[in-house]
């Protein structure tokens, strides 16, 4: 097989070492339940991940450079990892490692919620879209929860018409389940009082932060700017400039983007620009 010219998005040995155990455990568990348990695996997991990383950031996924696995195999693995929570597991593992590297506890006690409306591609059915009247965008809304370092805790992709507080309620419930140590959350003025009340029933103190009256131009809000920076990181990934997937697949692409970013930070490698 001819040797492929490496891409900047390809996993280095150090980054592959960070995630290999999770993917290997997933493959072992699936094959253990299969009838052909003893047969050698057909596709290399590192090659699959290289192809997934190559797709979002290096052009259309149909243009994988040979000899990466074929598109249908790559998307098949991506779909399984999305549906079975593997990409979320990778995100959680690297987030804990990075928090510990930064001198923080593995689990956060404070978080930030924000929403971003984005346009969709022409392939997305109209039934899965909506209109964000405030931002005049027809498409989808990405609501995310990050810790104070800007690392992803939870994500929910909905039609753009869904109100921020509705998505925020679902995200808070998820945060309480997955990160029970969380006691503080910050949001902007777009979130309504009933979300504050819901947070209180969960034992979480919610703080609504906003610019001071008369503020002009862009001024980061203290302690809430981290989530804005996270959206900036995500928008560096070409696949996220528009929403091209189903909501659950879109959430998985966001997990993949954050996994790539955190792996590079853990190994001291430059991020893909």
Image: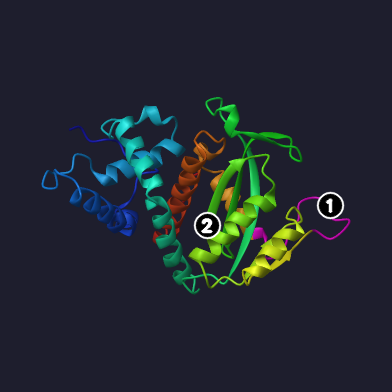
Q: Which residue is rendered at x = 73% and y = 59% of the image?
A: 194
Q: Quadrant of the N terminus?
A: top left
Q: Mark 2 Cα within 10 Å, few/some/many (few <14, many 20+)? A: many
Which residue appears farthest toward the right when viewing the image? 214
Which residue appears farthest toward the left when viewing the image? 38
| Residue 93 part of the magenta-drawn span | no
Give the main secondary structure of the magenta stretch. Answer: loop
The relative height of residue 185 versus residue 217 in the rendered view (above or below) is below
Q: Which residue is rendered at x = 53% and y = 56% of the image?
A: 154
The relative height of residue 20 versus residue 124 in the rendered view (above or below) is below
What are the residue bounds of the magenta stretch? Answer: 211-225
Residue 103: give x, y in percent of width and height: 49, 74
Left or right of residue 180: residue 79: left
Q: Mark 1 Cα within 10 Å, few/some/many (few <14, many 20+)? A: few
Residue 128: give x, y in percent of width and height: 58, 33
User: Alpha-carbon distance for marks 1 and 2?
Assistant: 29 Å
Residue 173: give x, y in percent of width and height: 57, 60
Q: Which residue is rendered at x = 45% and y = 57% of the image?
A: 262
| Residue 221 part of the magenta-drawn span | yes
Picture disc at residue 216: 1
The relative height of residue 76 versus residue 29 in the rendered view (above or below) is above
Q: Nearer the viewer, residue 203 or 7?
A: 203
Q: Nearer the viewer, mark 1 or mark 2?
A: 2
Q: Which residue is mark 2?
A: 152
Mark 1 or mark 2, earlier in chain:
2
Q: Identify the secondary structure beneath mark 2.
A: strand
Scheme of image coloration: rainbow
- Camera sees residue 150: no
Left or right of residue 164: residue 134: right
């Amino acid at each position: 097989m001819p040797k492929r010219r490496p891409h900047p998005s390809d996993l280095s040995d150090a980054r592959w070492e960070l995630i290999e155990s999770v993917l290997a455990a997933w493959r072992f568990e699936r094959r253990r339940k299969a009838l052909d348990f003893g047969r050698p695996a057909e596709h290399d997991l590192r090659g699959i991940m290289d192809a997934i990383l190559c797709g979002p950031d290096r052009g259309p996924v149909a243009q994988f450079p040979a000899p990466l696995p074929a598109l249908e195999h790559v998307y098949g693995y991506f779909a399984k990892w999305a549906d079975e929570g593997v990409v979320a597991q990778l995100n959680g593992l690297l987030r804990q490692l990075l928090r510990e590297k930064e001198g923080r506890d593995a689990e956060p006690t404070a978080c930030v919620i924000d929403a971003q409306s984005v346009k969709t591609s022409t392939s997305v059915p109209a039934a899965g879209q909506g209109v964000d009247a405030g931002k005049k965008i027809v498409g989808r809304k990405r609501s995310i929860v990050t810790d104070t370092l800007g690392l992803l805790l939870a994500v929910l992709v909905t039609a753009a018409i869904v109100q921020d507080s509705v998505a925020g309620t679902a995200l808070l419930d998820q945060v309480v389940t997955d990160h029970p140590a969380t006691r503080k959350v910050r949001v902007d003025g777009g979130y309504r009082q009933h979300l504050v009340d819901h947070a209180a029933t969960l034992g979480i103190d919610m703080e609504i932060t906003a610019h001071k009256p008369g503020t002009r131009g862009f001024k980061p809000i203290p302690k809430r700017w981290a989530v804005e920076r996270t959206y900036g990181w995500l928008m560096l990934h070409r696949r996220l400039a528009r929403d091209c997937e189903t909501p659950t697949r879109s959430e998985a692409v966001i997990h993949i983007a954050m996994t790539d970013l955190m792996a590079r930070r853990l190994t001291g490698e430059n991020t893909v620009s």
